[in-house]
Image (tube, rainbow, N blue to C red):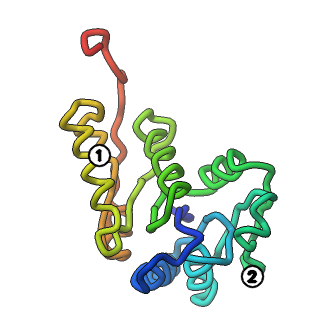
Amino acid sequence: MKYLCVFCGSSPGAKPVYKLAAQQLGKALVERGLGLVYGGGNVGLMGAIADAVMAAGGEAIGVIPEFLVAKEIAHPGLSQLHVVDSMHARKAMMAELADGFIALPGGYGTYEEFCEVLTWAQLGVHQKPCGLLNVNGYYNALLALFDHAVEEEFVRPRHRGLILEDQDPYQLLDKFALFKPITLHKWVSRDEI
């Protein structure tokens, strides 16, 4: 792995622990020799992780759609900043540049971005690790929803195992280093319909 894509909020959140976690993850990435790919903003958790990576001497690559340059205040001090035409182009470029995906706390956009790359992993579109940095239990409810989907047989247990999770950024990166993708031979058989 060379680059990890981090999805996160353009808000700092209600508690200082969220910004601290973004900063710790940024530092951990650099210590592990990993570059950051993210949404290109200079505010909220996006700004916090990018600043931490840059302050530690790492590489931070931002990808931001033109219409969000002013709203998310495009970060002026990145290693690279790609301004693209749309949200779809943003996600496609981030996915292409990254060797894995981590979601810090965030809102609808963070959930959507993470669930999309998780779905791609489930379908075998990529074999990159997907993880949640579960700061202060932020993702407990989402993880419970995923467990409920397994219980109700909308998600297979082995696909639930695609989600790596930890509260500590270093331990989450250890899990990424040990990640082994699952192999799908057939998605759904006619007997299961």
Residue 60 location, quadrant: bottom right
Work out whether 137 lies above or below 183. Answer: below
Q: Amino acid at mark 2?
A: Gly
Measure the alpha-carbon separation of dots 1 and 2: 37 Å
Which numbered marker is on residue 146? 1
Measuring 33% from the left and 54% from the top, which residue is drawn there? 142
Which residue is tagged 2?
A: 77
Q: Is residue 158 left or right of residue 118?
A: left
- Helix, strand or loop for disc 2: loop
Q: Is residue 185 left or right of residue 47?
A: left
Q: Amino acid at mark 1?
A: Phe
Q: Position of residue 132 (x, y in %)?
A: 38, 61
Q: Nearer the viewer, residue 138 or 20?
A: 138
Work out whether 72 lies above or below 128. Answer: below
Measuring 64% from the left and 77% from the top, which residue is drawn there? 43
Label 1, residues with CA under 10 Å away: few <14, some 14-19, many ≥20: some
